[in-house]
Image: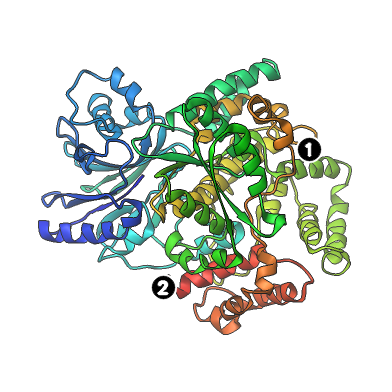
Amino acid sequence: MCGVTGFVGAGAEGELLRDVRRMCDALVHRGPDDAGEWVDAGSGVAIGFRRLAIIDLSAAGHQPMLSASGRYVATLNGEIYNFEELRKELPPAVYRGHSDTEVMLAAFDAWGVEAAVKRFNGMFAIAVWDRETRRLQLVRDRMGVKPLYYGFAGPAFVYASELKAIRRHPSFEPRIDRGAVRLYLRFLYVPAPYSIYEGIRKVMPGTIVTFDPATRDVEATVYWSASETAMQGVASRFDGSDDDAARELELLLRDAVRLRMIADVPLGVFLSGGIDSSLVAALMQAESRTPVRTFTIGFRDPAYNEAPFAKAVAQHLGTDHTELTMSEQDVLDVIPKLPEMYDEPFADSSQMPTHLVAMLARKYVTVSLSGDGGDELFGGYVRYFIGQRLLRALRFLPPFARPAAGRALSALTPRAIATRKIGQRIEKVARTLKANDPDEVYFELVSHWRDGVVLDAPPAEAPVTNRAEWPALHDPIERMMYFDQISYLPDDILTKVDRASMAVSLESREPLLDYRLVEFAWRLPLSMKVRHGRGKLLLRRVLHRYIPDALIDRPKMGFGIPLGAWLRGPLRDWAESLLDPAAIRKYGLLDPVPIRAKWEEHLAGRNDWNFYLWGVLMLQSWLEAGG
């Protein structure tokens, strides 16, 4: 895990070095072990790198690295897990060391960039300068585990793992993209390809972005498509039994975990005690001759404390378990760090406990595996079950009656519902009743602020909202899972884990997102994932071979905090200072009237608007920190 940055512009060698070093200095947390730069003043190219040494800790792993032919200069953030297998397929060569980066460059020499990338199994953000064609290529892994931004800063074409490095380029002028703000307040993250800044974009997962300095053209090439993968999967369904599917899944899972245990540094696993993390921990332990390190944080509030469940799983597996109970203040102390950590507004409140468990793990290991991806691929989110029930109910409710039913439920929400949690759910259901089709049901379930809050915001479409880009999946729940896979997963979940872990120089690996597992998951019929209001059926079947159902079979808790109560309590003064109408008007982005209405309802206890308010608070705190 590392930080990549650089640009193609103009200047003397000394100027290029100075500027790229300044950009690299913003990424020290991503790579505290080493730094490197490569410049070509004749081409105006400056490539920078910060290294967190994971494989080949010697100087032979130093980057930027040149290929043996001298044609390619590249930096790699992440890991190519199948590099040893690729080495055997490549022409015989003398390698300076044993890093995956050197194998990557040998593959470029032998097969070309696009053909090589299609053979990589890993998580990666790659920047490669082709000295022969004089073009820069930026590559992002299939699932979007590793981040990569790009765009223009004045006359220069810039790129980086994080926006903070781009902000260091002397020609960069930050201009907020109001369309991106509009999307952010709807989803509580900025969906790719947008960033919060005009002119700066995210490389889409499974994509190669090529910049040609001669023409200044920027071209995107998709080398792996989530849409095509989904369509190919449903066209060639797995036709065996549940047991047959479980056996094949287990083989894929074990190999995915084994590959992600390759490291020259200590490694462990985040363990919540849920299905996904318990499965990863169980398979790690099955592959290890010694107890693996597992890490859990607990909270004093039993409604949010998964530590006892994780401890029971760890004891059953025989792992070397570390647990730390966090106080309310420990979590609150993370809040001032969030604008710097995330670089753009980001409002998944589990970002705080995620950072805390990463801090705990980093005291003992440099790499930690996680269970991210299981919900999206195997049907774990409650919205899939709610969606099935809602869609069944809507079949019996005539379209002309739905708006009236929705209005009736909305009227109940603030006044007649006994608990705020139920009230918030009914408010969501009331909105879905007004949906014109099953896809709108999904978007009502996942949307928060809608039109009218962001002032002068132009319309903005992301792939997840653009119907023209959707695959022709017939089952509405499978479409929900597809939407989550292309947006919520990379832009929320993986962004959260990447920034929270890299802030403490910890590499996080996600075995459930091995692309072979993704392709297999799309072949599975929905009934092997979601059935009778229960999800992840096939994962449960595999996990049962390692851990008794009694240790796992409980309602999904999630990695949350009592945010709604904290906004009325210890966070009230902080929130009030940011939600004051004058504070909101200061930046000219938002209309304070609907925001204040929700804040006052929340404080009065008439409803729990913590998701909506956290979105505004993270935007406001980011603006206050300098935007």
Query: What secondary structure is found at the residue carrying circle 1?
Result: loop
For the N terminus, the image quarter is: top left
Please state which of residues 316 and 65 is positioned toward the viewer in this rendering: 316
* Count of marks placed on residues: 2
Q: Which mark is residue 533?
A: 1
Q: In this view, does 397 lie to the left or right of 184?
A: right
Sequence order check: which comes first, mark 1 or mark 2?
Answer: 1
Residue 104: image x %, image y %? 29, 31
Looking at numbered disc 1 in the image, what kind of residue is underneath it?
Answer: Gly
CA neighbours of label 2 inside 10 A, class few (<14), some (14 to 19), many (20+):
few
Instruction: Say whether marks 1 and 2 touch (CB < 8 Å).
Output: no
Colour treatment of the image = rainbow
Residue 168: image x %, image y %? 29, 64
- Is residue 486 placed above or below 154 in the rendered structure? above
Looking at numbered disc 2 in the image, what kind of residue is underneath it?
Answer: Gly
At 50% from the left and 33% from the top, the residue drawn is 291
Please state which of residues 387 and 58 is positioned toward the viewer in this rendering: 58
For the C terminus, the image quarter is: bottom left
Residue 51: image x %, image y %? 29, 47
State the image quarter where residue 112 is shown: top left
State the image quarter where residue 573 is shown: bottom right
CA neighbours of label 1 inside 10 A, class few (<14), some (14 to 19), many (20+):
few
Query: What secondary structure is found at the residue carrying circle 2?
Result: loop
At 38% from the left and 49% from the top, the residue drawn is 148
At 16% from the left and 30% from the top, the residue drawn is 68
Residue 450: image x %, image y %? 65, 62
- Is residue 354 placed above or below 456 in the rendered structure? above
Which residue is tagged 2? 626
Q: Is residue 50 left or right of residue 423?
A: left
